[in-house]
Structure formats: C-alpha cells, structure tokens
C-alpha cells in the first residue's frame, strides 16, 4: 500500500481560476486527476504533501465537437472518449484507446492524465502526435495553446510546471491508418512500444501525405520528417529502392538519437516501417 | 480525514488518510474483499471500477456497491441465472468481476450483440469459464432483464 501523508490537505477547485489561486498559494501541492497511475501498485511516485484534486474542475469536464476538431477537457475519461466511436475520426485513435487497459481502468483514467504522464505510458502519444493534437496548458504565469510535441519536450525541472486543461484533437480519417502496440499489460512497463502511421493517397496512387511515429516507454516519441518526405510524392506500390531509402533514413536518425537504443529495438522499429511501407503498396 | 459515503446502501464515515485505497478500506475495515485486489471490481455510482485505484478522498457522497451488496438484487439474479442457464461457471474470483461487467453492459445496451460483449470484456481475456458460454450467458441475462423490466412496466 502507498504511504500517504496522514495530514495531507485536499484542495478541490471548482474552476481554473480557483485552481490557479490554489497553485500560487500552495506551489508544492500535487495535482491529482483520475489517479490510475498514482494509485497503481507499481508506481513509486506517491504524493507526500497536499493534494489539489482536479476531479471537480468544471472547465476540464467538457467535451465539444466542431467540424474540424474535438475539444476534450483534460478530466474527460478515456471510456467517455471511446464512447464517441466513429465521431473520434481517426481509426488509429480508436484502436489506441481500445488497447489501453480495460473498461474499469478507462472509467477512471483521464485523457489529461494520460498525456501528462508523457512517455511513461505509450498507448496514446504516437497517435496524438501524428494527429497534430494541441494542448491548452496553464502555468502560474498564464495559459497558452501549444502543440503536444512542445509539451513532451518540457523540461522535467520546469519551475512553473504546466497543467493541461483542454486538448484539441483534429478530426480526420486517413486513407491508410495503422496502429500497433507491443506491451505486456498496460503500456507502463519498460520495453513497451507503440507505432502509428497515417497516409493519404491521390486518385492516381501518389502518396500525398505520410506520417509515422513511434513511442517508446521512457524514451519518448520518435518521428523523422526527412524519412516522411522521402515517401511523400512517390507512387505506390513503392519500389524496393524507395523503401530502402526510407528505412536507411530512419536508421540514421535512430543511430544519432540522444537516448541510445538497443540493437533489437532499432531492428524492431525499422522492421515496422518496412512492413508498413509494403502494406501501403497493397492497399 | 472523515469520509462519508454509502457502502452497500448504508452510510459509513471512516476516519482515514486521503490516499488510502478503497480496496484497503473494504478489506481491512469492512472485511468485504478477499481475492487479489487487481482482480476485484466494485460499482462506484453504478460504474465498475478497480477499488485499488480509488483514493478515499474521491469517495465523498458516492455510492459504493461490492459484490456482497449486489448479490441478492434482482439485477444480480438476472445475470447469475443467465450464467447458470448457459452453463457458464467462472471461478469464485472471476464471477464477481464478470457479473459487474455484464451488469454495466446491460445498463448501457439492453440487447448486446457479440461485439458489445467483446468490447466490454476487452482486457479480461482469456475468459475463465469459456468465451462462448459467456456470450450465451450475456444473451440469456439480457433476455431475463428485459422481460423483468417489461413485466414491471405493465
């Protein structure tokens, strides 16, 4: 069992203004969302001080849909998001949500919490990254809409840590979508990897857009725009030469990546790309 | 802190630390959970959740129903009888879990198709007692519940 502070005080803000005031007054307090990560038995990051409970934050419990994007409050649960089914737009996103644990877990887990875990859980980042998701984040000094990439790059020692309040997920379906996850149980364990690829085609078989991302537990999201530009504009099925060039470009990026990857991991990633480019040709 | 919530219909007010898990509360204070906590479900305001993921401070004013509180209700009887008629016999650890999952499914969909059942049981495979028997059990439970509700509204 976790060892919580017996005297911990629970603050329950009702809106973002109250949240900001509480964070200013209690800068060391711990923001607590659905709690599925913090409460899980294998988590070591147990809050030891006061807690700001985010579950009553009305601004983060709204879900709006426009023609071009879903605007999801960070406190919306993954099960509620999954219940949108085809209204989610991307099939890859639906698959990623379905692959995340089970119904009772998704009933508690929130989208904001999942994103805030960064690459500790690999299920969603690869898809959200490719879809061009944007986040409304709030620090003590104010709020801003930023691309999810920027959030993942936030320094872990940021003196003014961001809290996610809203998430905008563009709604679109690509002609080709592929999502894969390699995990043992929850995407939390080291070694878990997720992969997403979205591609669109012109009527004449030309690949008009191509995006491919990988998320590795503890390492983060990998994406190679150079490799993607090698594929874009090519006619499918891709020739062996085109596929080799794309794979080599990805290999180069993996070699120079700041976090060294084990050889089997590099092989796993390049094999996934190779297989996907082949499948793209079979459409 | 003192947390007031309803446990199987009764108001309780335990004095606990805020991050105490509901599973620990149920086991240590009320002797209600016996199996492994990661394979135990309860209903929190009617939704099946894992009690070890629920902190005490999230319980204020909520309705907690354990399998002990649920069994004996007409909703539970529909499911148990459906399971029995389909010869679906999961082990004592999985029976409460499956009962709650089927209950939540029938609350959402009165006549679930195979795909609905499959989606509700994602992450719970392999099914102890057999998947095909489970599908039959869900179908029969749904029928019983529908007929009972129909009977009540006449």
Image (cartoon, coloured by chain):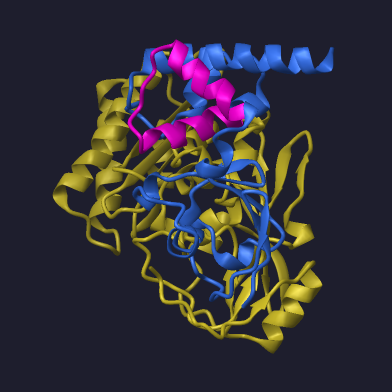
Name the one closer to the observer, A111 or B4: B4
Residue at point 38%, 68% (across, down): A1
Name the one closer to the observer, A222 or A161: A161
Relative horizontal placement of residue A258, taking residue B142 as reference (left or right): left
Name the one closer to the observer, A227 or A195: A195
- Residue B101: x and y in percent read 52, 32
- Residue A33: x and y in percent read 60, 62
Q: Is residue A193 magenta?
A: no
Relative horizontal placement of residue A237, taking residue A69 as reference (left or right): left
Q: Specify the colour of chain A.
A: yellow
Q: Is residue B99 magenta?
A: yes
Q: Residue furthest left?
A: A263
Q: Residue furthest right?
A: B154
Relative horizontal placement of residue A216, taking residue B61 as reference (left or right): left
Looking at the image, residue B154 lies above or below residue A73: above
Name the one closer to the observer, B91 or A122: B91
Q: Magenta segment, which residues?
A: B75-104
Q: Specify the colour of chain B.
A: blue
């Amino acid at each position: 069992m976790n060892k919580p502070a017996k005297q911990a005080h629970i603050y329950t803000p009702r809106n973002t203004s109250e949240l900001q005031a509480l964070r200013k007054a209690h800068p060391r307090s711990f923001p607590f969302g659905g709690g599925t990560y913090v409460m899980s038995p294998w988590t070591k990051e147990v809050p030891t001080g006061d807690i700001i409970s985010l579950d009553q934050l009305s601004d983060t419990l709204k879900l709006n849909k426009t023609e071009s994007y879903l605007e999801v409050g960070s406190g919306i649960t993954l099960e509620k998001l999954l219940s949108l089914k085809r209204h989610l737009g991307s099939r890859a996103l639906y698959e990623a949500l379905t692959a995340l644990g089970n119904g009772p877990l998704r009933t508690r887990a929130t989208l904001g919490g999942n994103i805030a875990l960064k690459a500790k859980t690999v299920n969603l980042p690869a898809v959200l990254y490719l879809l061009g998701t944007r986040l409304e984040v709030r620090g003590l000094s104010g709020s801003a809409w930023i691309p999810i990439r920027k959030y993942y790059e936030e320094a872990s020692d940021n003196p003014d840590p961001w809290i996610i309040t809203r998430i905008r997920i563009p709604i679109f379906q690509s002609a080709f979508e592929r999502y894969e996850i390699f995990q043992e149980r929850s995407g939390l364990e080291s070694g878990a990897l997720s992969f997403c690829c979205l591609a669109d085609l012109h009527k004449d078989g030309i690949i008009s857009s191509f995006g491919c991302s990988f998320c590795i537990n503890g390492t983060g999201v990998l994406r190679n725009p150079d490799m993607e530009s090698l594929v874009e504009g090519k006619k499918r099925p891709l020739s062996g030469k085109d596929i080799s060039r794309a794979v080599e470009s990805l290999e180069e990026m993996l070699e120079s990546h700041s976090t060294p990857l084990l050889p089997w991991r590099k092989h796993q990633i390049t094999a996934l790309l190779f297989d996907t480019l082949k499948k793209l040709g079979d459409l | 802190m003192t947390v007031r919530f309803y446990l199987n219909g009764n108001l309780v007010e335990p004095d606990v630390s805020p991050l105490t898990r509901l599973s620990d509360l149920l086991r240590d204070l009320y002797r209600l959970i016996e199996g492994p906590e990661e394979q135990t479900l309860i209903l929190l305001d009617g939704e099946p959740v894992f009690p070890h993921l629920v902190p005490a401070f999230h319980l204020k004013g909520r309705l907690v129903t354990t399998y002990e509180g649920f069994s004996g209700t007409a909703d539970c009887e529909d499911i148990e009888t459906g399971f029995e008629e389909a010869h679906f016999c999961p082990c004592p650890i999985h029976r409460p879990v499956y009962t709650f999952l089927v209950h939540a499914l029938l609350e959402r969909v009165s006549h679930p198709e195979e795909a609905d059942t499959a989606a509700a049981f994602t992450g719970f495979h392999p099914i102890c007692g057999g998947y095909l028997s489970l599908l039959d059990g869900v179908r029969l439970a749904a029928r019983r519940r529908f007929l009972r509700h129909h009977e009540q509204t006449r």
